[in-house]
Amino acid sequence: MIVTIDGPAGAGKSTAAKKLAARLGFQFLDTGAMYRVVTWACLEHRVDMQNPDAVANAARQVEIRFDGDRVFADGHEVTHEIRTIDVTHESRHIAGNVEVRSHLVELQRRMAQGRDVVSEGRDQGTVAFPHAECKFFITAEPRERAIRRQRELKARGEAVPLQELLDQIIQRDRRDEMREVGALKPAPDAITIDTSVISPTETLDRLERIVRERMTERSRSPDPLVRP
Ligand code: DC
């Protein structure tokens, strides 16, 4: 079974997706990490981010591997390196590259083949897995996301004004939503969950309940295509 979780940055979807996969015993696919690995590889090899062909080549060449929570690029662990501000910032060039997107979507489908997966990103329910059995769109008000981000940064000893974070979030959303391919939007059959108004535990419980309901429904109604 494929469960897709899409939504904007900072809505709490990564944590929810990871925990949901653990509760269900499904594999977790962090597609954002894949875009980050390509970004990291471009920075590492000094690829010109303004050159779409060079970026697409770099994407095709780098070998991306997951091992639990750990991420590897060409056999080198980059779990932490792909989370730097630099990588986050530069990833927009990678996410906007049509060829990179189609290559990574292909990889995502291969990784999910024959498995039970919770796949998290921006375009999982719309582009990568349009036939997924269960699709979610997890969102939260921009202001709420900015407050959460400010709290996270404060815990790390960084004080950033709320307005600055809010501006960044709005800008990033706009870029994600306006992208020509793989734009951030809910699939028509996705269930939207707004985490501004419910707690992380409630979010997780709701996700798990819906997936388990779908699993039961599926086991009760066999696929008409395979019926004699
Ligand atoms: O979710 P994240 O912050 O780790 O994502 C990193 C970058 O990749 C960000 O620029 C959004 C982009 N992304 C994407 O375009 N499509 C996905 N399926 C996942 C992430």
Image (cartoon, rainbow, N blue to C red):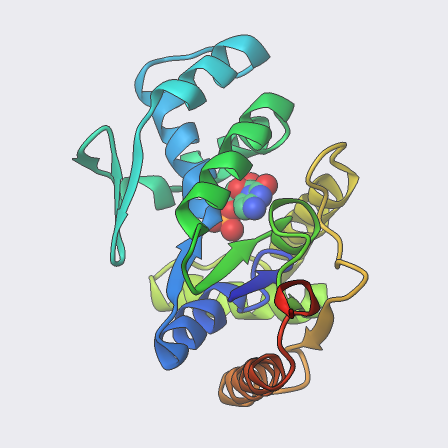
Q: Nearer the viewer, residue 16 or 48?
A: 16
Quadrant hosting residue 9: bottom right
Residue 138: horizontal and vertical position, in percent? 64, 68
Residue 124: horizontal and vertical position, in percent? 60, 52
- How many tags in the picture? 0
Residue 50: horizontal and vertical position, in percent? 57, 13
Q: Residue at x 70, y 63 (%)?
A: 142
Q: Is residue 223 visible?
A: yes
Q: Residue at x 55, y 82 (%)?
A: 219
- In the image, farthest residue toward the right: 188
- In the image, farthest residue toward the front: 228
| Vertical position of residue 60 compared to residue 190: above or below | above
Quadrant holding the C terminus: bottom right
Quadrant hosting residue 10: bottom right
Q: Quadrant of ligand 1?
A: top right
| Vertical position of residue 76 compared to residue 22: above or below | above
Q: Nearer the viewer, residue 21 or 228?
A: 228
Quadrant hosting residue 100: top right
- In the image, farthest residue toward the left: 76
Q: Is residue 216 left or right of residue 30?
A: right
Q: Residue at x 37, y 35 (%)?
A: 37
Residue 105: horizontal and vertical position, in percent? 54, 38
Q: Residue at x 23, y 28 (%)?
A: 74
Q: Is residue 133 visible?
A: no
| Vertical position of residue 61 compared to residue 5: above or below | above
| Vertical position of residue 67 compared to residue 57: above or below | below
